[in-house]
Image: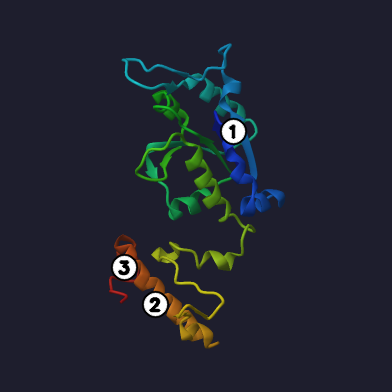
Amino acid sequence: MRIDIITIFPEIFSPLDVSIIKRARDKGLLELYLWNLRDFSKDKHKKVDDAPYGGGKGMVLACEPIFLAVEEIKKHNTGSLTILTSPQGELFNQKMAKKLAKEKGLIIICGHYEGVDERVKTIVDYEISIGDYVLTGGELPAMVMVDCITRLLPGVIPEEAKKYDSFFDCLLDWPCYTRPENFRGLKVPEVLLSGNHEKIKQWRYKQAIERTRQKRPDLYKLFVNKKGGQDAS
């Protein structure tokens, strides 16, 4: 997959060059390119924002440099979907990540300031938000999306491991333990030490259900409905 990110702060994206994402890039499973929006400004000072028509506080990202950037990127990332990070967008979740991970390529426009010129939305396929709160800009949401989508790409992590992630099958993950077996009186559940893999599997599944029921009743309801309307407890 190829992902192109349009931003006025490309230096923020250093976290995308470490850990799993770096390994995915090194293996050629992910192509990631950063584009500085100011490079597409026709203003002699490389200005990419202006005051909003009608007055008001803050500045708005202008449409021209964004249009030019997207048009240039599409010459290289053909068949890609264009995403605008926006607090007004559809809420990003694991289901959406799985859908986007199947795409050939993505272009992510990082919103900033008071937003972008409304006309930009005519060239956007999705407006996406990562939560009901306001951030300084769209750079962090872009990194969240890239991280989540990358680990779903074939070959990035073992396919079996993805089945045990939180939100798979509408469930949160089960409790995890490692050595020592007893730390200050806090003991690892005996079933995990039993060596009985079938019992361990059953225990983990029950724990995932109960954890979801307690912490995320909204997800638990989806899980119950998916299982045919019967309470899983």
Tell me which amino acid carries mark 2: Lys
Q: Secondary structure at mark 1?
A: helix
Residue 19 at x, y percent in the picture: 63, 53
Residue at point 51% right, 74% down?
177
Q: Residues within 10 Å of mark 3 (few under 14, many from 20)?
A: few
Question: As drawn, is 169 to the left or to the right of 66?
Answer: left
Residue 102 seen in the figure: no
Question: As drawn, is 182 to the left or to the right of 220?
Answer: right
Residue 122 at x, y percent in the picture: 43, 28
Identify the residue under disc 3.
Answer: 214
Q: Secondary structure at mark 3?
A: helix
Measured along the vertical axis of the image, is residue 141 above or below residue 102? Answer: above
Residue 232 seen in the figure: yes
The nearer-to-camera label among 2 and 3 is: 3
- Residue 15, by quadrant, is top right
Identify the residue under disc 2.
Answer: 206
Measured along the vertical axis of the image, is residue 82 above or below residue 231? Answer: above
The nearer-to-camera label among 2 and 1 is: 1
Tell me which amino acid carries mark 3: Gln
Q: Secondary structure at mark 2?
A: helix
Measured along the vertical axis of the image, is residue 79 above or below residue 189? Answer: above
